[in-house]
């Protein structure tokens, strides 16, 4: 995808989703996505107190791998070299802008991963 198309996607995303943070529930987990300082979305799954997903993490299960793990929250970002970073002056010509919808889907996928892992422990 070329840089002009990515810039257009970002502009449309800002118009549709002007807030910097959005929250939702996926597979029973609280989730949120927020924009970082580069204008890229980051996705997070927030676990209930006492839930310990640390041994279940597999970096291949989410875009770019897990890049955030603190307290009861695990997340990822969309600001890798192969990602379009709106507020960065340097972007690869074949990079991809991860839209709000893309990151909600990816965050939901991560929540499902933990939901499935939890179900496997119960069987």
Image (spheres, rainbow, N blue to C red):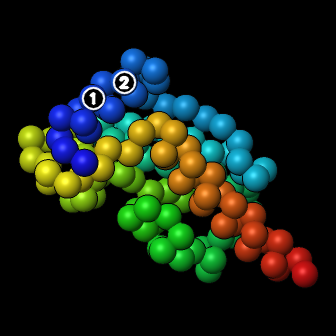
Residue 118 appearing in the image: yes
Place of residue 72 in the rendered image (x, y in percent of width and height, measured from the top left): 61, 57
Residue assigned mark 1? 8
* Vertical position of residue 104 compared to residue 9: above or below: below
Residue 76 place in picture, x, y as percent: 44, 57
- Residue at x 39%, y 28% (from the top left corner): 13
Residue 87 lies left or right of residue 52; in this view the side is left
Q: Mark 2 points at which residue?
A: 12
Residue 86 circle label: none
How many numbered discs sit on the rendered protein?
Answer: 2
Q: Where does the image place residue 95, in percent across and percent down from the top left?
A: 23, 53
Direction from residue 45 to residue 52 in the image, left or right: right
Q: How far apart, in angstroms, are the residues tagged by discs 1 and 2?
A: 6 Å
Query: Depth check: 30 or 8 in front?
Result: 8
Determine contact: label 1, label 2, CB under 8 Å.
yes
Q: Where is residue 30 in the image (x, y as percent from the top left)?
A: 68, 45
Instruction: Give the structural element (helix, strand or loop) at label 1.
Output: helix
- Assess disc 1: are there few (<14), some (14-19) or many (≥20) residues with their C-alpha within 10 Å of its C-alpha: few
Q: Is residue 53 above or below residue 121?
A: above
Specify whether residue 72 is in view: no
Quadrant the C terminus occupies? bottom right
């Amino acid at each position: 995808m070329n840089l002009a198309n990515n810039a257009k996607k970002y502009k449309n995303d800002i118009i549709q989703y002007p807030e910097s943070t959005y929250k939702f529930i996926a597979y029973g987990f609280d989730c949120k996505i927020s924009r970082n300082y580069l204008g890229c979305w980051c996705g997070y799954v927030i676990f209930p107190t006492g839930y310990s997903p640390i041994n279940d993490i597999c970096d291949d299960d989410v875009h770019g791998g897990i890049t955030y793990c603190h307290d009861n929250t695990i997340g990822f970002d969309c600001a890798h070299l192969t990602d379009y970073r709106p507020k960065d002056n340097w972007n690869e010509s074949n990079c991809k802008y991860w839209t709000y919808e893309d990151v909600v889907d990816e965050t939901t996928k991560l929540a499902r991963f933990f939901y499935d892992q939890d179900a496997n422990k119960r069987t």
